[in-house]
Image (cartoon, rainbow, N blue to C red):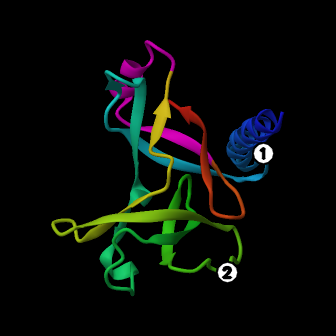
Amino acid sequence: MKRSYKTGIIIILQVLFLFAMIGVRYYTLSAGAPVLLKAAPVDPWDMFRGEYVMLEYDINWIKNENLNIEDLQKKDVYVLLEKGEKYWHAAGVYVDKPDLAGPRVFVKGRVGYFDEFKEQYHVSYGIESYYVEEGTGMSLQQARAFDTQIRIDRFGNAVIEKIIIP
């Protein structure tokens, strides 16, 4: 009886962990600020994952002069976003959470590498993959560029809400 009690606790903890993972994304979708980004597809098909689109945003590339800190590779950063005419753009990069003033939000990202040719850092935000219905991946590839509506919560977590093909 003691053994089944421990097994039951382990199963309950695993289920609670899964619900917590889903709950964080749901919170971001329901309470997050809407942000419109310009995106371009990178790869619309993978033999093992099915049809999905790897997305590239303008905010994935941060200019070297915007960063004051050396050796940022593989470190978490907060990218301050400002609303432009239509799209949001990166207005600053911080190691600590920035103070927000006006219509600004920040998104948490991770610096991957420094491209010496572009003299820019590549930052990933966890919104670079978007799974699509079977048969729709090629239409996204042919679009070449489209808009992505994302939601960013107050902690800097981002979730893709929808893709808008013009």
- Left or right: 111, with 28 as reference point: left
Q: Position of residue 73 (x, y in %)?
A: 33, 71
Q: Which structural element holds mark 2? A: loop
Depicted 129 relative to depicted 113: above or below: above
Q: Nearer the viewer, residue 27 or 99?
A: 27
Number of the label disc, if any, that sits on residue 30: 1
Give the residue drawn at x 31%, y 21%. Answer: 47
Q: Which residue is mark 2?
A: 99
The answer to whether residue 133 is left or right of residue 121 is right
Is residue 24 toward the left or the right of residue 133 in the image? right
Determine the residue positioned at 61% across, 46% down.
159
- Whether label 1 touches label 2, CB < 8 Å: no
Give the farthest residue toward the top. Answer: 135
Taking the spot 39% from the left edge, 81% from the top edge, the residue there is 67
The boundaries of the magenta stretch are: 133-150
**Mark before the other along the chain sequence, 1 or 2:** 1
x and y percent of residue 124 in the render? Answer: 43, 56
| Label 1 crowd (10 A; few <14 / some 14-19 / many >=20) | few
Q: Is residue 160 magenta?
A: no
| Residue sitting farthest toward the left | 117
Instruction: Decide: is 3 above or below 71.
Output: above
What x and y, as percent, mark residue 63?
A: 33, 72
At label 1, the amino acid type is Ser
Tell me residue 8's x, y (percent). Answer: 79, 35
- Amino acid type at circle 2 is Asp
